[in-house]
Amino acid sequence: MRTDNVTGFLLLSYLLLIVLASPLIDFGSTLSWHTLFSAQLLLSFPALLLLPAWILWRTAALLHWSPAAQRGILWLASSSAALFLFVDVRLFDLYGFHVNGFVLNLIITPGGIESLGASATPLYRSVTVRGKGCSHSCTACMVATGMPSWPPTAVPC
């Protein structure tokens, strides 16, 4: 697999992750250390999220896997990074928490989110993919709401 194609793909994925992470960053109105730290965080965090994708792709290339398998691994790993960041941003927007051990325990434990007096419906609705008049559930819905029964049902608009 040509490395220039991989470089372009990773660059586009990096830019997508910057766009996804931008709601988390508060730059403020004046130039300060906080602003510089925020800018550094916005540029480095997406690169750290894509590092496993690059490592997996490089490992597959060193093991001489087929180019299709290499592309699949790269796509799956970078898409997982984007999905994780999207769920984290949405979770922070809704509940004021990032993904951590406490949040994962609430999501995985049956009735965890309901014990807080909240519902998983807003998060579920935010990661539901809508298309041509019907709603199709995304894998992120299962992760974000604690793996509902299969097939997941769409949330009405």
Image (spheres, rainbow, N blue to C red):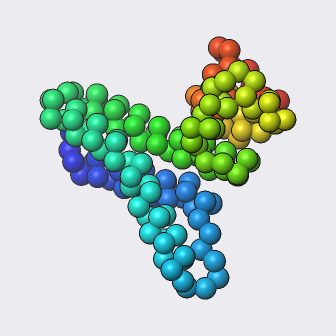
Task: Out of 20 and 143, give the one closest to the viewer.
Answer: 143
Task: Out of 116 and 127, give the one closest to the viewer.
Answer: 116
Q: Residue at left 55%, top 57%?
A: 21
Residue 134 appears in the figure = no
Q: What percent of the width, then of the height, locates residue 25?
A: 59, 65
Q: What percent of the width, then of the height, locates residue 72?
A: 35, 31
- Please indicate whether residue 31 sits to the left or right of residue 64 in the image: right
Instruction: Tell me the quarter of the image containing the C terminus.
Output: top right
Q: What percent of the width, then of the height, locates residue 47?
A: 38, 55
Task: Out of 97 and 64, give the one closest to the viewer.
Answer: 97
**Vertical placement of residue 146 versus 71, above or below:** above
Instruction: Tell me the quarter of the image containing the N terminus.
Output: top left
- Please indicate whether residue 87 sits to the left or right of residue 116 in the image: left
**Vertical placement of residue 141 versus 55, above or below:** above
Total count of labels: 0
Rendering quarter of residue 146: top right
**Vertical placement of residue 131 versus 45, above or below:** above
Residue 41 appears in the figure = yes
- Please indicate whether residue 54 sits to the left or right of residue 19 in the image: left
Rendering quarter of residue 154: top right
Q: Residue at left 41%, top 61%?
A: 44
Q: Residue at left 38%, top 48%?
A: 50
Q: What percent of the width, then of the height, locates residue 86?
A: 58, 46
Q: Residue at left 57%, top 42%?
A: 100
